[in-house]
Amino acid sequence: MDKVIKMTLLFDFYGPLLTERQQKFIDLYYENDYSLGEIAENYGVSRQAVHDTLKRAEGILANYENKLGLIDKFLLKRNKLADVARLLEEAPEPPPQQLARARKILQELLEMDRG
């Protein structure tokens, strides 16, 4: 997965757990495409300070995902839902096999929420 996409997902899921400064730097750098120099200039700090803050925040976000796995669960659910949609759209009147498979996928999704 591309680093920018990965960081954007991590920030979407865990961003509120960062400090306000970390949140702002991540937002500016990854979502608004600011350079380290631009962020440093706007906040009156060195480029190194911005770099260190970003690296620390990236590590914190990655650590949350390693422990909680919310993004992995989200992506798995999204893929399963896409499978269900594809199965149901393959025929105007889905044959019983496709309905049974779609039901099984939906049941897996429901069970994932319990565990």
Image (cartoon, rainbow, N blue to C red):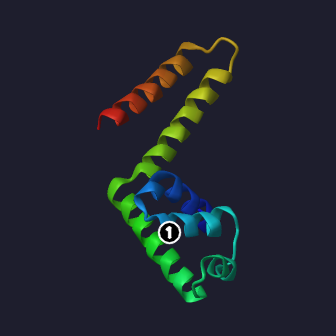
In the rendered picture of this protein, how many numbered marks are placed on residues?
1
Quarter in which the C terminus is drawn: top left
Q: Quadrant for residue 113, please give it.
A: top left
Tell me the kind of residue under disc 1.
Arg
Q: Position of residue 114 (x, y in %)?
A: 30, 33
Does residue 50 lie above or below 1 as drawn? below
Considering depth in this image, is 47 or 79 the residue closer to the camera?
47
Relative to 78, is 104 on the left or the right?
Answer: left
Considering depth in this image, is 14 or 49 the residue closer to the camera?
49
Q: Is residue 2 visible?
A: no
Considering depth in this image, is 25 or 101 the residue closer to the camera?
25
Q: Is residue 69 visible?
A: yes
Does residue 111 lie above or below 8 as drawn? above
Q: Residue at x 69, y 78 (%)?
A: 38
Residue where numbered disc 1 is placed: 21
**Label 1 crowd (10 A; few <14 / some 14-19 / many >=20):** some
Q: Residue at x 49, y 82 (%)?
A: 52
Q: Position of residue 112 (x, y in %)?
A: 36, 36
Relative to 87, is 15 on the left or the right?
Answer: left
Considering depth in this image, is 5 or 97 the residue closer to the camera?
5
Q: Residue at x 70, y 68 (%)?
A: 33
Asked which secondary structure carries label 1, the reply is helix
Does residue 106 lie above or below 74 as drawn? above
Q: Position of residue 108 (x, y in %)?
A: 40, 31
Q: Residue furthest left?
A: 115
Q: Position of residue 96 (x, y in %)?
A: 54, 13
